[in-house]
Every structure is written in structure tokens, then in C-alpha cells.
Amino acid sequence: PLIRLEDYRPSDFLIDRVDLHVRLHPTATRIIAILAMRPNPAGDTAASLHLDGDELTLVALDLDGEPLAPEAYAATPAGLTLMRPPRRPFVLRIETEVDPSANTKLMGLYRSSAVYCTQCEADGFRRITYFLDRPDVLSVYTTRIEADRDEAPVLLGNGNPVEAGALGAGRHYAVWHDPHPKPAYLFALVAGRLGHVAKPFTTMEGRAVTLAVYVEPGKEARAAYALDAVERAMRWDETAFGRAYDLDVFNVVAVSDFNMGAMENKGLNIFNDKYVLASPETATDADYAAIEAIIAHEYFHNWSGNRVTCRDWFQLCLKEGLTVFRDQEFSSDMRSRPVHRIAEVRALRARQFPEDEGPLRHPVRPAAYAEINNFYTATVYEKGAEIVRMLRTLLGPAVFRAGMNRYFADNDGRAATVEDFLAAFATESGRDLTAFARWYERPGTPRLSVETVYDVGAQSCTLTLRQSLDGDGPPLVIPVALGLVGASGPLDATCPQVEDDVFVLDGESATLRFDGVAEQPVPSLLRGFSAPVRLDISLGDADRLILLRHDTDPFNRWQAAQGIAMRLLLDGAGSSEAATAFGVALGAFLDAEGLADPAFAALVLGLPSESEVANEMAGGVDPDAIHRARTDLRRSLGRTLRGRLETLDAALGADLAAYSPDAASAGRRALRNAALDLMATADPARGAIRAGERLDTATNMTDRLAALSVLAQLPGADREAGFDAFGRRFAEEPLVLDKWFAIQATIPEDGTLARIEALRRHPAFAMTNPNRVRALIGSLAFGNPTQFARADGAGFALVGETVEALDRTNPQLAAKLLTAFGPWKKWETNRAAAAAEILNRIKAIPGLSRDVADIAARVADRR
Ligand code: ARG
Ligand code: ZN
């Protein structure tokens, strides 16, 4: 049963006010919902009233103070229908009971390590009470939370705290009021024993706000970085987008069982603790960066998502793509913009491109879905962000900012659509954005092919650009940032169709003529990755080395090195002369600027991942061959660069005194650890000793984990001793053990599946905890191509069994794991057949959840 965008109809009823009374109990929580309702003038006035429910038990129901006659309504766990609802405003009082301890789906109200919390997006509120659980029904909420003071001394809700006090029998209560109308998916409450850190903040409008981060008692110190990130995000949104915060408090809570990263509930963001807790001893530089980005992301939703919300779930990219774009801009301003851009594009190519080119492909704004929770995808989020970025490139920063202001002003307090978003920019720019809007509708990654002809006599260069995308449809609007580079530096050539170094390709093809080109140029195209497309251009290694040396665009400098490495890997030429030549060129690069920008240098030195290589292949993927080629190339580079890597290691090690998570320090650690990895591949015996030493002496998790990862590649007693020591040292630190699980699950060796089986029985592992499952089983499925896609099918089987087991307890998590089978048709035939067998087995399981059934059907059937 598909839900379709074209079937959208406004709700027949509205809910203006919601008064919730929640009496918390570990297994029998009572919820009284008092709903002030009225018929929607825009709806069908003769309709019955159907409220959504999911696994609910109705305890009592009355209308305007009178109990309803049994024949006037029908209640099931999945819904409540009033046959003849009033045609005037009325008040419905609904009492339900739920069992938070038995809620293993982690949707609705559940308990995580004795803390009550909620997750309502996309449709979890209907697991708390019967409701019009759709994002275009906006209500003002008052929430009264009651609990045992011993069990839950802290009671948090949306909005502002208005009242709190003691009740008899050790109970107490708190009342929260949120003046901003919101859809039910933004509702939240938290109750439990929690510590916190807090600081005051004054908005640009002069509002005094208390910012706080709540964590497990005893972990307060580890919340300091997140709290600091909240403050920086709030200030940044004021400056960058003119957006101020709008309540008296802003609370963030970390919980340890959470299906996703975090959730932007109004005034009460709830986080996976992995994206809150950090200390130098337990978190890596990457963790700090992720915390900063996700804290910002959820905070930015306060405007892009909450103040302006979505009309329906087809518009998910309206809040997610936009908010990812906003958090990317924030991180770029906090850190190195080019380095961050490269990281964004790597993530897009690694996760979104395969999605866009495989059986799970869908438009950024899907037209139909069976299960909306399966559409929180890289396409909606990351490609959605690229569309916003292209819009800014097309309109320029000033008009873009004005368009954003107009979008917020025109849609404040409303549930909006992609059309509303584009209309704001069309109005501000006076441009017709109809053709641009196709980016939201057309799935797939377009190809942009470019041919270059240089005419010495005329001193001119012609570029022919052509776009293609399978499936019918008119061309897309592709902003191509570009320039020409010569053997000793950028060339100053002119072309009338290029404005501010950007050409906008809005037809199938175009020819650009540059004049005043004094030498054979190398075109630098798609600078800054100006559009989410695949670029087909035949450049030789010599051309690419010119770009690496002389391009003014850091992204394309990095891309040039990646391009050479990718070709070597695709050709299986990791130990060729060409590989040696590449190493020599990288050596020159490192000598010239390795120490000037270590973070960038680390990226240039980093090779495409095995999955990235597989993504470049049309079919017949053999993960073992890719792994061998990549190991060969790493070994070759390690040998060619040996002297330099030693020098870098010494130079970068010298100034690493006290740990600081800032981007510059992180960059030095990244380059030093990249050097360690290459040295160890080239000389495993010395590498094992060096990594073992670093494992013992590291003063922070970044270096310790880097050492462990290097050791993990080197079979032997040292490695096992290293794992053992690490496991014991962090036995009481679940988030650190996740890293330990993950590294072991990604070892590219035959013994890994047995190791995973053993780790599944480790006392710290639990199938009920999503972070543990993602660390151990998710790392196999998404991070270990040779062992997941084993020719004997054993990797598929292990992941398949996990999907089957989780389907009964946590279908959302199960469905995510199953998406690892997405590329199965690209694997060579034995592997593809083994994967198909597991997929079919899963499809045949009786009583499969909608989440898993939807992914299984889509992965198995199409394309
Ligand atoms: N809105 C949240 C965020 O991106 C994610 C919610 C994910 N929900 C889901 N059902 N998968 O910030
Ligand atoms: Zn989001």
C-alpha cells in the first residue's frame, strides 16, 4: 500500500491545543490527552474523524465532558474513529496506557537505561495517544509530566517550564508550555536521573536563554564540548541567517539507546549519546567534529523544520536537505572550508551515489512511499543539501540570503512545500526556477561529459559539455564552476558564457569558447564540486598532476590526486611504475606543503576506499581484487615516500602536547596517522612495533584508535595483545567499545566472521542497543566489503540473520542494516547469487515488518 504525493488532501479536522497529562510508570504509563479540535474549513465537512494509533490501549474517551456511546466510535490499537464528529469546535479527552519498558522499537515513549524518553518523528506520536499524526496539523502543547521523584528527579518537556512541585507518595510533577504551534512529530519528553551542564545565552533580540545539556550522572564533564557547540551554533545562525532562538530554555539530552543520530524536538533536542559525550580519552577528532555538526544540525532545525515545518513527509528534504546545508556551512566556518567540502563530497559519493544508482534510488522528493522511515536517506539529506548549495551558486550569496529570509518570513508557523521554498527564491531573484526544480523530481546521478579542443593558432580552447541521465525527462540545470590551468599556473582566459567562474548548463549540451589561451590548458571543472554529478573527462596523469600543483581550487587539487589513485586501483595497477610515479609526485607535494596544511595533505594522501572503487565499476565487482589493488598501492606509496613519512611523523609528533580538538590540531594528527598507516603497510614488522608503542603511549583516543586500526591490518600476536589491552582498558566505556567492535568487524580476513560471532557474546554487546549493533554488525555490512560480500555467502548470511532477529524487536534498525544489500547486482555472479538467496529468504519470513518488507522488496526487484 503506497502513499502518494498526488493524493495529498488537507486534514478534515484541526487540533488547536493539546493538553497532555503523562503519569509515568515503567510498564504502565497513563496518558490523558485533551484535544481542542474543530473542523478544518479547508477539509471535508461531512467526514468522520479518524485518529492514528499504533499499538495503543484505550482506557477512556469522552467528548465535551460526556463519555461517548460505544456505537459512536471504534477503537483498535491502530486507530480511533468517531463516526459522527461534531461540526463545531469540540474537546476530546482520550486516555491511553502504554508500556515504555516493552517498547523495543524505540519509537514513541520508551525507557533507555532507566531514562524515559520519546522519539516521535516520523510517526511515533501515535504510539503515545490517538492523534492526527501528520505534520500539517499544528497545535500548541502544554505537557504535565508526573513521575516518582526517586526514579526521575528530572522532568523535561517542550517549550518553557511553567510549574513544578511535589505530590504525595514520592511523586512529583512539572508542567511545560510550548507557545509555538507544532506538529506532533516534534513532541518530546524526558524523565530520569540525569546530570547536566548549563550556561546562559542572550540572543541578538535580547532574549535571555538558559542552554543545558543533560547526560548520565557522572558524565557532565563530557558534555562540555556539546554545550559549547550549542552556543556557537546559536550565535552563528544569528549572523549567517538572521535566525534567533525563541524560547527561554534550550535543552539537549543524551540517551544511550537511539535509532538515529539525534532529533530536533522543539526546545528539547534528544541525542544519541555518541553525538554528545566527548573527552580526549574517549572521543576522536572525528567524534568531536560530528558532535559539533549534529548539535548544530538539530539546533538549526528550530527554524528550518520547526518554525517552518513540512506539509507532508514527501517534503522531508525541505527541512533535512536545507538543514544539512546549514550545518555544512557552519562546520565550514568553524573549520577549514576546503577540507570540510572534501569530506562532504566523499560522504556523498560513498553513500548517496550508490543509492542513486541502485535499486533503492528515489527522487530527493519521493513521489510515493510504503514506509516513510525508510526515506531518511543520503539522497534526501545529502543530495538535498547539494540542491540548496547549487541554488546559492546560481543566485549568488546575496540573493540567496534574501531568498532564505523571505522563505522564513512567508512560511513562519506554516507547514510548507518545496514549491514554497523555491517561490521565495524566484520572487527575490526574479528568475524562473521551474527547470531547476527538476532536481527534486528526477532520481539518478547525472553524467557530465566534457571534451576539450585547443587551437594553438587561434590561441583558443573549446569545451563541449554534455549532460545525460537515464530515464525520460528534460535536462537539469547544472552549475559548472570552472577554469583553465596551464603548466605553470592558472590561465587567464575569457569566455562570454562564464560568469563569476560559473557556467550554467541548462540544455543537453553546450560549447564554450575561451579566447586568449596562451598554452595547452588543463580544464578544471566542477570546482568545489559545484553539482552532484559524475564527471567524464579524459585527463592523463600529467594533466592531473598539473591540477594538483597549480589549480586555485583546493577541491579539484584533491580530486586530481584521487583521480590518479582511482585509475590505478581500477586498473589493478597498485604496484606498477605508474604507482611509483604517483608516489614521487605526492612526495613533491608533501615537501612543498605537507606541513603548511596537514589536514589537506592527509586527504590528498588518503586513497579512495574499497567501496568508492566498487562504486566506479559498472558490474562484476570482486571485493578481494579491489582490496589487493588497494593494499598494493598503499605499500607502493609507503615505500616511495618512506623518508618523507618518517620526517613528517617526527615533525608532527613534536608539537603534540596537550590535546585540543580544534581543526588545526586534528589536521596534524590526521597527517601523522596517515603517515603511520602507509609506513606500516610498507614495512609490516616495523609497523607493528611502532603501532604497538603508540597504542601504549597515546594520550588521546584519536591517536590510540589510529594505532589500533593500523595494528588491525597486521595479523599476529601483537595485534591480539593490542585488542585485548584496549578491550580491558575501556571495559566500562560502551562508546569506546563500539570503536573496538567496529575495528575488529572490519578486518579484511577470513577469520573475521568467527571473531564477530565471539564478540556477539561479549558482555558489553547487546542486540537491544542500536549503537552496539551498528558497531559490530553494521561495520561488517557497510565497512568490510571482502568479508560481507564473501564468495561463500557467509557474510551475507550473518547480516541476514541479524536483520531477521531485529525485525521482531526494532524494525527500523533492521531495515537500515538490510540496505547494505543495495549494490548486490553489481557483485560478480557467485556473490550476487549468494546475496539474492539471503534476500529471498528474508522476503519469505512470515509477519515481516513493513520497514524490512519494503527494503527487501525494493532491493530484490528493481533494476
Ligand atoms: N529529524 C532527525 C534529524 O535528521 C532525524 C529523524 C529520523 N527519523 C527517522 N524516523 N528515521 O535531525
Ligand atoms: Zn535533520
Image (cartoon, grey):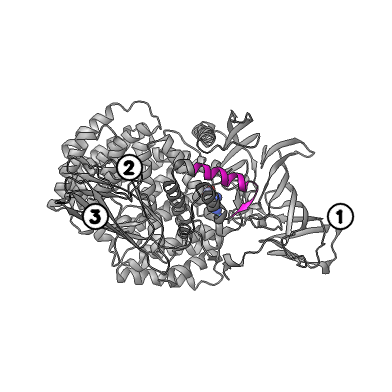
Of circles 2 and 1, the one toward us is 1
For the residues marked 2 and 1, what is the alpha-carbon distance in whole angstroms? 65 Å
Secondary structure beneath dot 1 equals: loop
For the residues marked 1 and 3, what is the alpha-carbon distance in whole angstroms? 78 Å
Which of 411/256 is in front?
411
Residue bearing mark 3: 462
Q: Residue at x 53, y 37 (%)?
A: 237
Which of 424/679 is in front?
424
Residue type, label 2: Leu
Label 3 beta carbon less than 8 Å to ligand 2? no
* Quarter containing the N terminus: bottom right
**Looking at the picture, how far across and down is residue 836, in whole percent?**
39, 71
Residue type, label 3: Thr
Residue bearing mark 2: 708
Residue bearing mark 1: 65
Q: Residue at x 41, y 60 (%)?
A: 476
Secondary structure beneath dot 2 equals: helix
* Quarter containing the C terminus: bottom left
User: Counting residues from the N terminus, which is met first, the one under dot 3 or under dot 2?
Assistant: 3
Viewed as shown, does residue 355 lie left or right of 710?
right
Give the residues in magenta: 400-416
Q: Residue at x 61, y 48 (%)?
A: 411
